[in-house]
Every structure is written in C-alpha cells, then in structure tokens.
Image: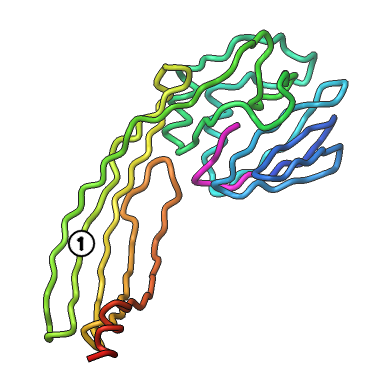
Amino acid sequence: MHRHNRYAEQLYVVEGEFTVWAGKQTAVLHTGDAFTIPAGTAHAVAVTGDGPGRVLVVASPSGFARLITEVSTPDEGGEVPPSAAPDMERFLRVSAELGDEILGPPGAPARLTTRSCGCLGEPDGFSGSLRLSQQPTYGPQVRAGWRRTPGFLTAVGFGAFLGGVQSLNGALNGQKTEEQRLRDTASYFFTPTLQRLLERDHDTSVIGGFKQDFSSTARAFSTLSDLHREGIR
C-alpha cells in the first residue's frame, strides 16, 4: 500500500487482470478497463489473473516516470523477465524525493504475490508483516498581533510541524512529515461575550502530506456562562 501525494495516477489495462485497492474502493480490471487514482489516495495494484499483465500508467503532473525508469526492469517485448530482489534503498530514496509514501501491505488478501508488473504488494518469497512507525512531530509557532480598536484584533503568524520521521520494520524508509504554514487572523468582539474569528492559512512547504495553497475559516464564539450572568444582572 502506498500513496502519491503530488500526482494522480490513471491505469489502462493492456493485457491480463489487475486488482486495485484505492481508498475504500476495490476494482478488478480486465483488458480495456481504466481506473483513476486521485493524488493523496492510499492504494495498491497487483496482477491477479492467471497469466502475466501489462498496464499503461499515466501520471499527472509528471514524476512517476522517473521512479519507473530508475528502479524497474524494462519490458523488452520477449519473455517475462525472471523475478529479482528490488533495490529497496534506491526505491525508497527516489520515492521520498517524489513525495510518495510507503504505507504497508494493502487491505487485501493476506498472501498477495506480484507477477510481471512493478506494482507493490507482497513480493515473491515474502513472509511476515510490515510495521510502519513514525517518530513524534513538534509544532513551534510564532505570532504577532495588533489591537486596532478595543474590540478589533489582527495577527499574523508562522507555524511548523517538524519531525515525524518514518520507519518500516525498524528501518528508516526515507519518509517524514513536515509542514510550514503562514496564518493571518482577524478577531472582532461584538460584545464582551460574542466574538467573530476569521482565519486564512497558506502552506509554504509540505513534506509527506497534501499542500494547501489557500484555506480560510470563519467562526463565531459566545461564552454561555457570561451570557447567563449578563441575563440575570
């Protein structure tokens, strides 16, 4: 099971049968079928037919082609090449540089083996389980505010989540979770007990997650105990 955070992936089956686990969906694809996996969706793909399988993969924006070029075995158009142990160090390094995440085995049959495609499942000869763990993250924040009127406040700030280094079965897999975000807020007190808060966020840098160019939140707060006291005075 893995996830591409920076690009979507579309599969078109040229030959054979493939099973796709994507989010909460499971799809069995045959020759001529297509399936789109949105960016940020956890998924796994495997050949599940009796014979070999061939699939055309279109990734947008580009990036996935680099992973295939550097770590896969080329299809020379002849016999299916013999199975060989992958270079996991190179695979994890390139995946991390592309923003991909290795999440562990799919929510699928416990003994899933791959055939002639470079898809992620349980490789031939694998037995046991994969354990993904993550170190703690830390969230420092800096904020500066201005009181424009007695009831109107504005502020700008910078926040970050750092750390979150991941390991697979105790070995670092090159993945981590980091986020840097700018936030500006405006707060207005209509009464001492009724506040309206506007927030606007912009992610300046995200590793191992989904980057939001812009998001906004509007909220209103009231202090019920204070309102109750106001009502009984």
Within the image, what quadrant is residue 218 found in?
A: bottom left
Q: Is residue 32 magenta?
A: no
Residue under numbered circle 1:
157
Q: Is residue 2 magenta?
A: yes
Counting labels gives: 1
User: Residue at horizontal 48%, vertical 26%?
Assistant: 132
Query: Is the residue 20 above or below the residue 143 in the image?
Result: above
Within the image, what quadrant is residue 148 found in?
A: bottom left
The picture places residue 74, in percent across and down from the top left corner, at 65, 21
Residue at the limit of the structure toward the front, as seen here: 232
User: Residue at horizontal 63%, vertical 26%?
Assistant: 120
- For mark 1, does the 10 Å Cα neighbourhood hold few (<14), some (14 to 19), or many (20 or more) residues? some
User: Residue at horizontal 59%, vertical 17%?
Assistant: 129
Between residues 15 and 223, which one lies in front from this camera angle? 223
The three-letter amino acid code for the residue at tag 1 is: Gly
State the quadrant of the C terminus: bottom left
Query: Is the residue 196 above or below the residue 41 in the image?
Result: below
User: Residue at horizontal 22%, vertical 57%?
Assistant: 158
Residue stretch in magenta: 1-9
The picture places residue 124, in percent across and down from the top left corner, at 69, 12
Between residues 26 and 66, which one lies in front from this camera angle? 26
* Coloring applied to the structure: rainbow
State the quadrant of the N terminus: top right
The picture places residue 170, in percent across and down from the top left corner, at 42, 17
Left or right side of 199 for 64: right
Left or right side of 215 for 72: right
Left or right side of 220 for 6: right
Left or right side of 203 for 157: left
The picture places residue 212, in percent across and down from the top left corner, at 41, 58
Between residues 107 and 52, which one lies in front from this camera angle? 107
